[in-house]
Amino acid sequence: MTKYRDATIILVSAFLALTFLSPTILATTLGDDGWPGTAVVDVKPLFYSPSQLFIKPGTTVIWRNTDTGGHQIVLDGTISDFLDQGDTWSYTFDEKGIYEYKDAHNLLVKGMIVVQ
């Protein structure tokens, strides 16, 4: 009976993980908000969504502040304007590579763009 209970717990856990992680995985894989050549990253209070994004060269990434507090994005030696709630900032990635970015006001909030 223990084997069946353990298997049930594993299956339920896997289902819940896929249910809640799937939008992030899809957004990370597709990274497309419906417009050709663009992807959107939502700025949340303590994280970015998605936190990892895989895109093609020439893609413009738009950071959209959905938090009530202000944020600034630090990326590749560039600092965005101060973003109030609802504000956006964009950056076009022309070259392949791995780009890490962070929040200027909370350095523990980080994200990564992979241009492939």
Image: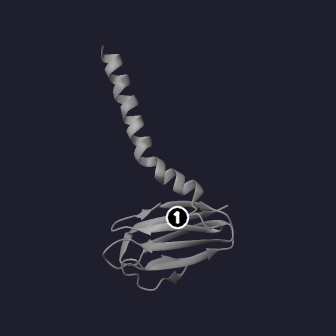
Quarter in which the C terminus is drawn: bottom right
Tell me residue 43's x, y (percent): 41, 69
Tell me residue 103's x, y (percent): 41, 74
Indicate whether 46 appears above or below 86. above
Image coloring type: one colour
View extreme (bottom): residue: 81
Q: How many marks?
A: 1
Q: Residue at x 59, y 56 (%)?
A: 30
Q: Quadrant of residue 4?
A: top left
- Residue 94 placement, left or right of 40: right
Tell me residue 54's x, y (percent): 59, 59
Q: Quadrant of residue 17?
A: top left
Disc 1 marks a residue whose amino acid type is Met
- Residue 86 placement, left or right of 58: left
Quarter in which the N terminus is drawn: top left
Q: Residue at x 48, y 65 (%)?
A: 111
Q: Which residue is mark 1?
A: 112
Indicate whether 89 appears above or below 61. below
Q: Residues within 10 Å of mark 1 (few under 14, many from 20)?
A: some
Tell me residue 37's x, y (percent): 65, 68
View extreme (front): residue: 34
Looking at this view, is 104 or 37 the one in front? 37
Please, what secondary structure does the residue beneath circle 1 have?
strand
Indicate whether 93 appears above or below 78. above
View extreme (top): residue: 1
Indicate whether 38 appears above or below 71. above
Looking at this view, is 103 or 41 the one in front? 41
